[in-house]
Amino acid sequence: MKKLYFQLGAVMTVGMLASQDAHAGNDFSKIAENITTSIQSVPGLLTGLSYMFGIMLGVLGVLKIKDHVENPTQTPLKDGAIRLAAGGALFALPIIFEAMFTTVGDTGQVTAAASLQKVEFNLN
């Protein structure tokens, strides 16, 4: 056990000596830049969590419906249906966000007005 503590202490010491300074400066632009850099991976994390919880609620919904089939007096059907609906909504959430982002864009304004193109058919 002492050997493990020694190795852990050695790794921590080398890690502290090899690291760079943690200070980022005192101006607001540097702080904002660090915050922007730090939160770039948050959408990917939320997408992964949304898919994971959507699948989990879907499986739990199927299990609740199975419980309803086996014993309808104890387990109402709405319990399984609510879990399935919530799981489907969570599973679709990243796709909806991507569609919204593609439609609106970065600036929050519509990039081009909707228009209809004339369609002509060649009857020869």
Image (spheres, rainbow, N blue to C red):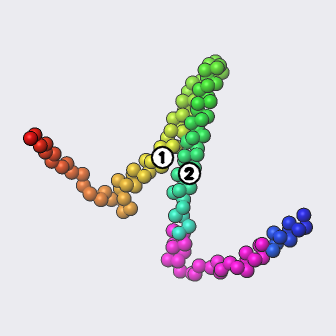
| SS majority, magenta | helix
- Judged from the image, the secondary structure of the residue bearing numbered disc 1 is helix
- Looking at the image, residue 99 sits to the left or right of residue 27; the answer is left
Q: Quadrant of residue 2?
A: bottom right
- Judged from the image, the secondary structure of the residue bearing numbered disc 2 is helix
Check disc 2 and give the amino acid type: Gly
Residue that appears at 35% across and 53% down: 103
Confirm whether the magenta stretch covers residue 124: no
Callout 2 crowding tier (Cα within 10 Å): few <14, some 14–19, many ≥20: some
Confirm whether the magenta stretch covers residue 15: yes
On screen, residue 30 above or below 81? below
Among the two numbered marks 2 and 1 on one chain, the one whose residue lies closer to the N terminus: 2
**Residue 65 in sight:** yes
Q: In which quarter of the image is residue 18?
A: bottom right
**Could you say which is closer to the camera, residue 124 or residue 36?**
124
**Residue 79 in sight:** no
Check disc 1 and give the amino acid type: Leu
Q: Where does label 2 land, which residue?
A: 48
Residue that appears at 11% across and 43% down: 122
Residue at the right extreme, as displayed: 2
- Looking at the image, residue 29 sits to the left or right of residue 75; the answer is left
Q: Where does label 1 land, which residue?
A: 93
Residue that appears at 52% across and 64% down: 40
Quadrant location of the N terminus in the rendered image? bottom right
Numbered range of the magenta stretch: 11-36
Calculate the distance from the C-alpha at mark 2 to the C-alpha at mark 1: 11 Å
- Image spot of residue 61 (x, y percent): 58, 32
